[in-house]
Amino acid sequence: MTAVDLEFDQLNSTVDALRRSISNRLMYGVGKDAATARPQDWLNAAALAVRDRLVARWMKTTRHQYEQDVKRVYYLSMEFLIGRTFTNALLALGIYDQMKEALAGLGVDMEAAAELEPDAALGNGGLGRLAACFLDSMATLAIPGFGYGIRYEYGMFRQKIIAGEQVETPDYWLRAGNPWEFPRPEVQYMVHFGGRTIERDGHVQWIETEHVNAMAYDTVIPGFATSATNTLRLWSARATEELDLSAFNQGDYRRAVEAKETSENVSRLLYPDDSTPAGRELRLRQEYFFVSATMQDLIRRYQRTHSTFGRFAEKVAIHLNDTHPVFAIPELMRLLVDIHHVPWDRAWKLVQQVFSYTNHTLMPEALETWDVEMLARLLPRHLEIIFDINAEFLKDASAHFGHDVDVIRRISLVDEYGQRRVRMAHLAIVASQKVNGVSKLHSQLMAREFFKDFAHMFPARFTNVTNGITPRRWLAQASPPLSALIDQHIGTHWRRDLFELSKLRALKSDAAFSSEFRAAKRRNKIRLAHRLMHDTGIMVHPDALFDLQVKRIHEYKRQLLNVLHVIVRYNRIRAEPERDWVPRVVIFAGKAASAYKMAKTVIKLINDVGEKVNNDPLIGDQLKVVFVPNYGVSVAELVIPAADLSEQISMAGTEASGTGNMKLALNGALTVGTMDGANIEICDAVGRDHIFIFGHTAEQVDDLRATGYRPRQIYEENAELRLALDQIRTGYFSPDDPRRFSDIFHTLVDWGDHYMVLADFAAFAEAQDAVDARFREPRQWTESAIENVAGMGQFSSDRTIAEYAHDIWHVKPVDVS
Ligand code: 26V
């Protein structure tokens, strides 16, 4: 590479310099002047001024990575739930106050402008947000990590609540442009579909395919307080010229344009469903589209500095965020064997050295499989490769297990029962050098139950890496009052070393600190109360206990358990309105997959119960029920810092980890939770006295199921619960449509109560009574809250990424000095 020495402005970040940059960017970047600029234009100009300051670091990091010929991590994920970038980038650069002042000098209120930035909502929930926290941590730790995914034009749908029901509207998040991305039209790869395979000169060729180009868009990922800066590369579908021309030459212009549109659909929208594999061809195309481009890109990058594949495994680690990117495995095999003519055995060895896989859910309905017939039609070469991998694997398995047909049938990559399907998790496990779960319990269940045959064959492959969250976004950015208080007492270094928070333990009985801690929480509660008033018209009192359950709406997460308790509480208050109740605001937020009827009914039930409770003059401020619409990263940043209580009440054994549980505890909320996912580790970290644990453990759930679970008996024997369920069944909350919720009743009482809501109800109600008792003692409550914050060190995604880097990827930080 030859290069001239460029002369460009070295940008400093004094208030004056920033003001000048913003003015320049407004004029020359956005094309407006102060007279015509709308708030959105100011935001874009300011964002470009920030971006300019990141770019020099970005170039430098890339150059260092190249010069040091570092091993790189490719983090493949269908979802990256980044949220907003502006404030995050300001904090990473340490120029928040300067920018605020510079904008104020230009007559712009920065915080108001920041609210105009749309969320990059390119994900459904936990898995996507985890990927975003990981990008933040990889950059902060200077790990040479690339995120790879899809640049969906439509992200997660926007949720409106109309007459208590979820209404989905499309989220065209790119409407006002995206100042954080760089289009790279020069980086395009062709991705093929369909066709057939032939053998020629001893090599397989995949011919007569249709194709689409994948074009790269790069987003800068700044590390916090470091010049290390990484890249998130997202692919967008572009019609290939061949495709345009073939129809055009035949004189059919309209068909040519239509074909172009159709081929570009592949990156159009995010599948808004995390509950079932939407058995859709387009989803399969998406998965293959982005991994094919990614594998081509990483081979090209490797080949820039290496002439053979001899050092491939020393320089490349590829991580599969769940099974969605698993086609990367046969695709890399295809590229190595068919295109680069690496012998099969050697290619397979390389593949097994570079891949690793994280499982994020054991819910059987979410484990991906693909119909063999569809694969034969869309990806015929990949199906052959998968069959070949399977044949060899089953040979090894027979050797390992003896000829036990049951085991062989269970572990085969192909489910032969009924319509043949490829099991993507099995392919991921067979091809990966490490496979991990996301909490201790989840990893145990994986190795001992769900994938036990694999764990028997490859014991060293299975491991645990408990999830984490970035403290930059989830404390520093989301809660300015609490961050400032912590800074005053223990300094600012906790942002990079979250274990520093343990120093707060020494202050837990300090009366002055406790009262400032309470004041910080109160400010966050007031901020939320204002927004609730504005958005929902519901007035809540900031001295009430703010009780949050915020997450995707799903039966296994048991929002219904929470609602049942709300109803019981309501009945109790109505029976004795004069008693001295602990006032509560029960806040729900979350989206339901659009096809998930039961989840949508649960949203309606929450709103109907809220309608009744909130308007009952007997109740007043003792109880409020609020559903906050459109849960996503930005809403989370608003509501989480305002929580007193965190509901983590999934049936034990179903929530792989949870990360909202960590965000809430980090913000000083006490958890009421089951022994599930990372709750168990949170319990260990904060101490049994500072968390409200209830309900059946995973083992007890199994036992109960084995001995015969009878929900109707619980219904009959618990009078308070029976009343609540009867109210649901008979239309007490839905007088306009008394049978609206009868399916909810029957699901719980008559149809098996699959998630054992009734089995845990009594224990849950008891735990809630203990919550009330503790909340009556503000000093004790605050002590527990401080213990929670102090115990969160291990839940930083920096710790998580350090473990991946050391134990799984074997990568080291790049030296950026
Ligand atoms: C599945 C599918 C199927 C096809 C349609 C689109 C789609 C999108 C996502 C999923 C799987 C979602 C799995 C997931 O989000 N798991 C969550 O991962 C978190 C991070 O590890 C973890 O904390 C949560 O417990 C787990 O539910």
Image (cartoon, rainbow, N blue to C red):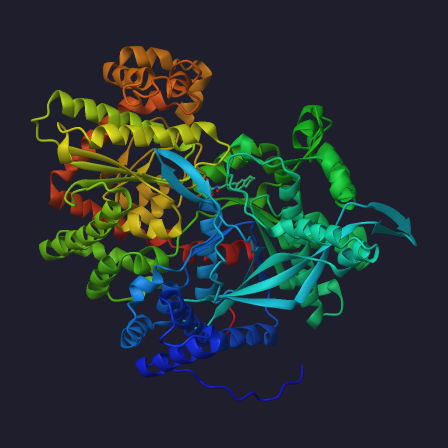
Answer left or right for 664 relative to 421. left
As drawn, the residue found furthest toward the right would be 201
Displayed quadrant of residue 755: top left
- Residue 187 or 692: which is nearer the viewer? 187
Which residue is at a point 40% across and 77% down the rendered structure image?
Answer: 33
Examine the rendering and report whether any part of residue 352 can be seen. Answer: no
* Residue 574 in which image quadrant: top left
Residue 362 vs 291, above or below: the answer is: above
Percent from the top left, x then y, of residue 443?
A: 49, 40
Q: Position of residue 803 (x, y in %)?
A: 47, 55
Q: Identify which residue, 32 or 560, lies in the foreground.
A: 32
In this rendering, the count of numbered labels is 0
- 134 on left or right of 642: right
Q: Is residue 291 left or right of residue 599?
A: right
User: Can you give x and y, in whole percent of width and height, for residue 236 in the image?
Assistant: 61, 57
Residue at the image position 57 percent from the left and 33 percent from the top: 452
Quarter of the figure that contains the N terminus? bottom right
User: Between residues 415 and 587, which one lies in front from this camera angle?
Assistant: 587
Residue at image point 85% right, 51% down: 205
- Residue beneath the point at 68% across and 24% down: 406
Q: Is residue 647 visible?
A: yes
Q: Position of residue 117 (x, y in %)?
A: 40, 60
